[in-house]
Image: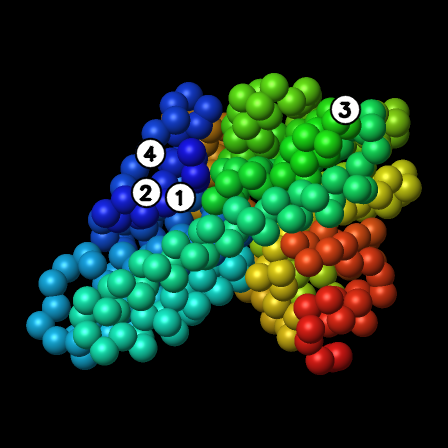
Amino acid sequence: MRTIFWNEGVAIIDQTKLPEKLEVVVCKKVEELVEAIRRLAIRGAPALEAAGGYGVALATVEREFKSLEELKKHVEKAAEMIISARPTAVNLSVGVKRVLKVALKGESIEEVRSLAIKEAEKIADEDVRRNRKIGEFGAELLEDGDTVLTYCNTGRFATVDWGTALGVVRSAIKKGKNIKVIACETRPLNQGSRLTCYELIEDKIDVTLITDAMVGIVMKRGLVNKVLVGADRIVKDGVFNKIGTYTLSIVAKEHKIPFYVAAPTTTFDWDKTSEEVVIEERPKEELIYCGTKLLAPPKVKVFNPAFDCTPLSYVNAIITELGIIRPPYESNVPKLLGLKSF
């Protein structure tokens, strides 16, 4: 089953319910989808790209319109709302802008709706294909018998299907390699323990769960051969990913363990630097509570950024659907992406 798909609305696997329950919900209004994105019922950069595209399609059908002009104004407003739901992950805006551009070419209400849905479906289908390509390229970096340390969730729940970093693991195993995984729990919302472990156990892939604070001792004892993470935005001087990734990269560098990033090319925002990217801050309740259990005094001050930035100097390679990019990134990224040098 895909993580997100069109079913007379935007159907998503509600990731907040996992691992207790696998539940599909259908968003019939843009406001419902935006709320689902904000509360992380749907998350992960590639999945958000599809959500952005489907969100524009949803805006065209969520109510009746008296005129084509009214529809287009409504869709443009909805697009802004969707993009604002997660400011750090660039893929969300990529999906929104792509479908919006195509949909606005429609010359009737029905044509706008048809164009939007078809383009959103294209994004979803493309995501599955490119994740498979990421997996094929990345699998070459893994040796038979490797143990991979991964962070957050980069599998099918973070994409439409297959996964980025976990897709590399899946592809390597499909090629006959024996690969084990060590998954960090990834506080504060435990996407590693709740989602990554769920996926890997379902696929019968050997996985061991650790707390985020255990990465030092795990690497020092030589229990890991490679570190493999995803990305929410890649700029000229760094990789934005789930908070804690930067710390992970430092420990890996200290222990001379290769640190790889797996991401589609739509995650690159190469004309920006890290100082230009807004890092989303999450509600304090995510740290104060675990479910309904109080973990800290309710009045305590909380700092809760959702992402951090890992300098590219800490990254040994970036795995994309077009191939593997190695340093120097300032010349090799534009070369692979077909961009002008910056």
Tell me which amino acid carries mark 4: Val
**Pointer 1 and pointer 2: residues touching (CB < 8 Å)?**
yes
Q: Earlier in the sequence, mark 4 or mark 2?
A: 2
Q: Is residue 181 above or below residue 94?
A: above
Q: Secondary structure at mark 3?
A: loop
Q: Secondary structure at mark 2?
A: strand
Q: Secondary structure at mark 1?
A: strand
Q: Which residue is mark 2?
A: 11
Q: Identify the residue at horizontal 70%, vertical 29% (top origin).
A: 173
Q: Is residue 294 left or right of residue 328?
A: left
Q: Which residue is mark 3?
A: 178
**Pointer 4 and pointer 2: residues touching (CB < 8 Å)?**
yes
Q: Identify the residue at horizontal 72%, vertical 61% (top origin).
A: 238
Q: CA distance from mark 3 to mark 4?
A: 33 Å
Q: Earlier in the sequence, mark 4 or mark 1?
A: 1
Q: Earlier in the sequence, mark 3 or mark 2?
A: 2
Local packing at callout 2 (Cα closer than 10 Å; few below 14, some 14-19, many 20+) is many
Q: Which residue is mark 4?
A: 24
Q: Identify the residue at horizontal 84%, vertical 43% (top origin).
A: 258
Q: Secondary structure at mark 4?
A: strand
User: Which mark lies nearer to you, 3 or 2?
Assistant: 3
Tell me which amino acid carries mark 3: Asn
Q: CA distance from mark 3 to mark 2?
A: 35 Å
Q: CA distance from mark 1 to mark 2?
A: 6 Å
